Each structure stands twice: as structure tokens, then as C-alpha cells.
Image: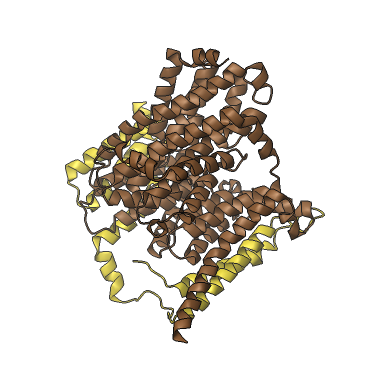
Chain colours: A brown, B yellow
Amino acid sequence: MFVQAIQIVLQPDVLLTIFFAGCFGMFVGAIPGLTATMATALLVPITFFMDPVPAIASIVAATGMAIFAGDIAGTLMRMPGTPASAAYVEDAHQMSQAGKANEALGACLVFSAIGGIAGTLVLSLVAPQLAELALKFSSFEYFWLVLLGLSCAVFVSSGAPALGLISLFIGLTASLVGQENPTGASRYTFGSVELLAGIQFIPAMIGLFAVSEILRSYTKPSAEARIPPVKGSIFRPQLGNLRRYPRQVLRGSGVGTLIGALPGAGADIAAWVSFAISKRFSKDKKRFGTGHVEGLVEAGASNNAAVSGAWIPALVFGIPGDTITAIVIGVMFVKGLNPGPMIFIQQPEMVYAIFLVFILANLIMLPIGWVAIHVAGRLLGAPQRILMPVILVFCTVGAYAINNSMAGVVIMLCFGVLGFLMEENGIPLAPAILGLVLGPMLEKYFIVSMIKADGDLLAFFSRPIAGGLGAITILMCLVPVLGWLRRRRSVRIPEM
Amino acid sequence: MVKANHTILGMLVLLVGTMLVVTSFNYAALPGQAYGGGTMPRLIGTGGILLGLYLVVTSRFKGRVASFPSEGNGRADWLKDRRKFAVLAVLGSIIFYMLASPVAGFLPTVVVMTGTLMLLLGVKVLTAVTISFVTAFVTYFGFSRLLLVPLPRGPIENLLW
């Protein structure tokens, strides 16, 4: 069976497909405004003309590369390609400003590949068992998981927690817009048809990060300011990082795979939770946010491990783990691969072929990523007064391309101004985007849970996993408060 | 450049939170249930009110007096400062794209948009014009022809394709 799978995968057409799809994904992901989901959607019509394994291989390769490629823009220009990348964009960007772009990008690349391979190994060995665990998650567990992700974003972002809470408040408020609520009421749409679907998070993210960064670049004193070049070896520093942080790699891969396996949870929550765990248990806590590689290692591994983990419910139950696997499940049905328990019995060689494709795609990411980093480094070395208008065009077109509507450009503009004002006042951006993305999920699971529990709040702690997640979330929120109270007490005691 | 202290931030958050709570009563609950479209706005609004009060109280406690950005000569100097004027130009260029591209088409709009921004920051005329044209055509080709994104078409796009 395994030998059959190798024979299916190691064909010239499959290998070439993986390579070219990887290049396509790298190109799409590196441009601010284009995303992994867009790369997948654009590949779907092309997959109609392919055999099943190359079709799935193309999507796997493209999405893996696109997610890493978003880290290139995030590290060099502080414009993350995904909300997950926003978890570590600050540290990555600070490292590039300090002339360590090679180490930052290398960490994102290598540990993403390691996380992706680790997630694939878990997928291949224990997918059915993990899927059974995922089925035990009810609305109560999901509620706490989403709240945990949001809390992590607030308490690990730079600056005072109060400012992080302002950012989260902005994101959650924006998420209220539209009809995506339990009653389907048109909330805060002000009569606009475009806002019925809510505020799209991709144009909002482009505005918050990319446009606000462009605006900030225009306020810098030097018109000749350039993005620092990528110098030095990308891979050599990672040997040292692997020796220094083996626990972080394993932990990030594990957390990413577990959270990615939960349908709907996704890499966004995984990356933020991993970053928070990394900071919480680090011996160098104070260096987080100033250009420290440890968070990149753990959250980078978690990011791609979650992408692999999202395939667990997709393959085992046909339940999509995220937007990308939702598209892939459609492609699988078209190709005669019916995801669900029977695929492991009826077409096991195809399942193993998909696992092999995952591993190959993560390995091929290394050389393609190396080329992409160096090409991006050269292209982005132009003076910012020339570079920023060009990036603005890509951002505008990218925001437009989401729904082929100017509404995306309007959202980008408004969030661009908002992001600029937030940064001027020291308010972190990432909790806002996470609030926008996770707000509807938080509302859905809260309302469903309250209806099931008939208003009894204790029901949120009645199930063991929910109780555990709830306790962790509450502790996460209380620890900074207790720390503050302890510091005040230690200041007062000497005065007495 | 546009910095507000915590009192002002707190008051803004308090205001938005209050508006959320007040408007939340406009949304009906699910039939037979106490929860509905107004539940989350009420919860988020209440959180905003508490956060706003916390910010206002703590910044008052720390002796930060609320003040607005100073008026007077600041505004004229701000406009004279070319860099800050370029910020307005970036925002203006996006608005220009939104208004002009459906009428004039993508290519001429982007050429004007990028060329103007570069010239404002002192890029040489020939460099600005060349890069604007290249950017416009490469972007149009890549998005519209390869990725099949229906970018705004005008007379020039209709002539060329």
C-alpha cells in the first residue's frame, strides 16, 4: 500500500505539479493583498484537467508556500499575509531592522517546514484517533478555545494590556457588522448591501497593516529609506536555533496540529496560542517583541502544523478544518475521492499518497523559499518612495479582488486610517484583526451554548475539556492582574 | 503626529460602548429565547464601557490632564510639511482610484495615482513616469489576464484587449 503510494507520487507529472504550484503559491502569498485562500481558489479550475493526486498535490503545495510567503512581506515590510503571521510579525520585523532578516526569514521557513512535516506525521499515524477527540468538542469547548485565542492576542501583544483590549474591542465591534449572527438581523449595515456580509477581514488586514505602514513610511524623515537587505545564510543560523529551542519546536508542532484538527479553529488561533505559550514559558520573556527568534520558532512551526492538522477532520469525516480544506473537499469529490471513514478502507493508497505529497511539499518549500527570500530581498531593496506607491497599487487591487467590488477598497481605506491612528497611539494592531476574524465564531458558540445551557453559566465548566480550557483562559487573564497587584504591593512595603 | 492621551481614548471607547449597548435593544431575540442579535453588541458594549471608564479613571489618577492637539500655527506648518502632505496624498490617491477607475479604466488611473505619489516625494520625473507605466501594465496583465480578476475597464483597456 505504501509502495503503491510512492509509485503514485513519484511520477514526473506529480513532482512537476508540486514544484510549479509551489512557485505559484510563493508568488501569490508574497504579494500583500493576495492570500493562500485566493491561491487555492484560483487553482481549482486548473485542477479539473488533472488526475486526482496531482490535483490535490497542487493545492497542498500552493497553500503551504503561500502561507510561508506571507511571512516574507511581514518580516521585511511589517505587512503579514495572514492573521496567523501577525502573531510574530513584530519580532520578525524588528529582527530584519537589526540586520537579521536572514535569521528571521530562515526561522519562518525552516520551522514552518518542520511543523508541516510533524503535522503530516501525526496526520498519518493518528488521524482517526485525533478526529474522535475533535468530535468531543462541543460549543462550550469551542467557545473557550476562541476566547483563549483572543486572550493570548491581547496579553502577548506589545504594550499595556489595556491598549491590547482597546484593539480587541475595535476588532470585536467591527465583527458585529452584517447578517452573520444567530438571528440573521442586519446589524450596523446602515442600509448598505455590501455590508450585509460583514466587514471582510482580508481588506481590513491589508488596510490595518499594509496601508498604515505605507502611511507611516511617508512620515519618516529620509526619502531614501530602504528596507534592510537580506544578508547572510538563511539556513545556518537555524541549526543553532534548533539546538537552543527543540522543546519549542515540538510544542509548537503539537499545539498547532491539535488546534488545527479542530474544525473551524485554524492556524490563526494556533499561532497566537503557541506564541503566548512560548512567551509564558520562555527564560527570555522580556525580549519578546524586541526582535527575539524564540517566538518565531514556536509559532512558525505551529502555523504550518495547523495547516496539516486541518486535514484530519477533512480526511476522516469530510468536515473542513478551514476555508482551504473546504475548497479541497470539493475538489476531492470531483475527483472521485470521497473523504470520510471509508476512504481509509476503499482507497488507502490514495490517502498515503496525499500524506507523501504533504511531506514533499514541505521539503520543496525549502529551496523555493530560499529563492523567494533572495528575490524578494532584491526587489524590496528599492527606495521606499518608489516601492510604497507600487505596493499601494497591489494592496488596492488585492482588496478589490476579494469580491470584485470597490467595497473592499473602502474597507481597506478606512482600516488603513484606523491602523495608522492606532499605531500613533501605541495600540497594537493584531488583536483587532483577530477580533474581526474570531468575533463571529465567539458569538455563535456563546449563543448556542447559552441556549443549550438555558442560561446557566456553570454549564460552561461542566464538561472536562471545557472546564480545563475555561480555567486556562481565566488564568491567562488573571495572571497579568495579579502580577500588577504584587508589583504595587512590593512598591508600598518599602515606603512603610 | 496624531497622539491622544488615555483620557481621550477612554472617552471614545466609552462612547462607542454606550452606543453599542443602546442600539443592541433594536435587535430581536430568537423566538422563545432570551438571546439574539442584540446579545453580543450588549456584551461587547458593556465591556467597552468598563474599559473606557478604567482608562479615564486611571489616566486621571496618574495626573494626565485631557487635552486636545494644539491649534494655531501647528495646522499651517503641518500642511507645509511635505511628508505629512504626502500622507493625505496617499489617502487621496485611494479615493481617486475608487472614483476614477470605473470611468477612466484601471491603466490610466494607476499611472496617475503612482506617478503623483512618486513625484510628491521627489522621485525624478522620468523614473516616476516609467515605473508608473510598468506597474500599471504588469499589474493589469497579472491580475486581469492571468488571475482573471475583472479590473475596471476603460477606453484604453478596450482598445488594447
User: Image point 48% across, 54% down: which residue?
Assistant: A281
Residue A362: where, in percent of width, then height?
Answer: 44, 30
**Taking B39 as reference, is A193 above or below it?**
above
User: Camera-side residue: B6 or A42?
Assistant: B6
User: Image point 28% across, 65% down: which residue?
Assistant: B79
Q: Is residue A82 visible?
A: no
Q: How many marks?
A: 0
Q: Is residue A154 visible?
A: yes
User: Image point 66% across, 39% down: which residue?
Assistant: A134
Name the quadrant containing residue A263: top right
**Taking A171 as reference, is A34 above or below it?**
above
Extreme residue toward the right, this view = B32
Residue A189: where, in percent of width, then height?
Answer: 59, 53
Image side of residue A131 versus residue A70, left or right? right
Quadrant into which the N terminus of chain A falls: top right
Image side of residue B158 versus residue A444, left or right? left
User: Image point 53% across, 40% down: which residue?
Assistant: A254
**Taking A39 as reference, is B111 above or below it?**
below
Residue B24: where, in percent of width, then height?
Answer: 67, 62
**Taking A158 as reference, is A315 above or below it?**
above
Image side of residue A369 versus residue B149, left or right? left
Name the quadrant containing residue B37: bottom right
Extreme residue toward the bottom, this view = A496
User: Camera-side residue: A6 or A265?
Assistant: A6
Image side of residue A425 versus residue A229, left or right? right
Residue A403: where, in percent of width, then height?
Answer: 51, 39
